[in-house]
Amino acid sequence: MLADSSASAGNPVTMRRLATPLDLEAVFTIYMHERVVPFLGYDPMPLDEFRAIYKELVDSRSFYIYEDDGRVAGFYRATRYPGRVRHVACFGTLAVDPALHGKGIAHAMVSDAIEHLKADGVKRIELYVESDNAPGLRFYKKLGFECEGTLRKFYKRAGEADYIDDQLLALLID
């Protein structure tokens, strides 16, 4: 789907590539960080339990790593729908190392992914953002994503009694 590449000059991210088994511990550390895990799809867990989830991500060949100076700075998953909706991709499992927040990594990572999906013929990119994730909603809207609807009681975080609404956002590519 997306080929490995180097980011453009001046970009804080140095490389985008498919995840490998060697990235497990770095991805786990970011994924399970207290500022990240509430917004991703799995509850906190030990590394041994995460191994099977990570193997599925790697085996999908749609899970990408962003490196900055040789270290894992962030990651995301970009999957294409099949058949008549092959022109649609979905972003998910997107996170940046909290130690690197505010350095433009997320913007560079998502912008690069959009460009590569566009070059691959994608005309629509979808993603879900929790309704209470105001920074995430602002971030994606700045990149041109628009809210297309609310998925009521769609998401449940560990340790919380109530379900959270998600917003379906989409970016249409000409």
Image: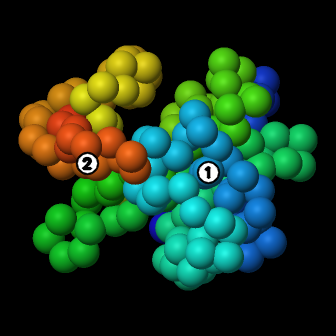
Relative vertical location of residue 68 with respect to residue 105 in this rendering, above or below: below
Residue 112 quadrant: top right
- Looking at the rendered structure, the secondary structure element under dot 2 is strand
Q: Is residue 62 left or right of residue 98?
A: left
Tag 1: amino acid: Met
Report the front residue among 117 and 80: 80
Q: Is residue 56 left or right of residue 19?
A: left
Residue in the picture at 25% in, 29% down: 131
On the question of residue 86 being in view, the answer is: yes
**Colour scheme of the rendered structure:** rainbow
Q: Is residue 58 left or right of residue 5?
A: left
Report the front residue among 92 and 153: 153
Q: Position of residue 110 (x, y in %)?
A: 52, 38
Q: CA distance from mark 2 to mark 1?
A: 17 Å
Q: Position of residue 45 (x, y in %)?
A: 58, 63
Question: For mark 1, what is the residue?
Answer: 32
**Badge number at residue 138:** none
Badge 2 density bin: few <14, some 14–19, many ≥20, Cα 10 Å: some
Relative vertical location of residue 99 with respect to residue 25 in this rendering, above or below: above
Question: For mark 2, what is the residue?
Answer: 155
Residue in the picture at 80% in, 72% down: 22
Q: Position of residue 89 (x, y in %)?
A: 32, 56
- Looking at the rendered structure, the secondary structure element under dot 1 is loop
Tag 2: amino acid: Tyr
Report the front residue among 59 and 145: 59
Q: Position of residue 41 (x, y in %)?
A: 41, 56
Instruction: Give the quarter of the figure containing the C terminus.
Output: top left
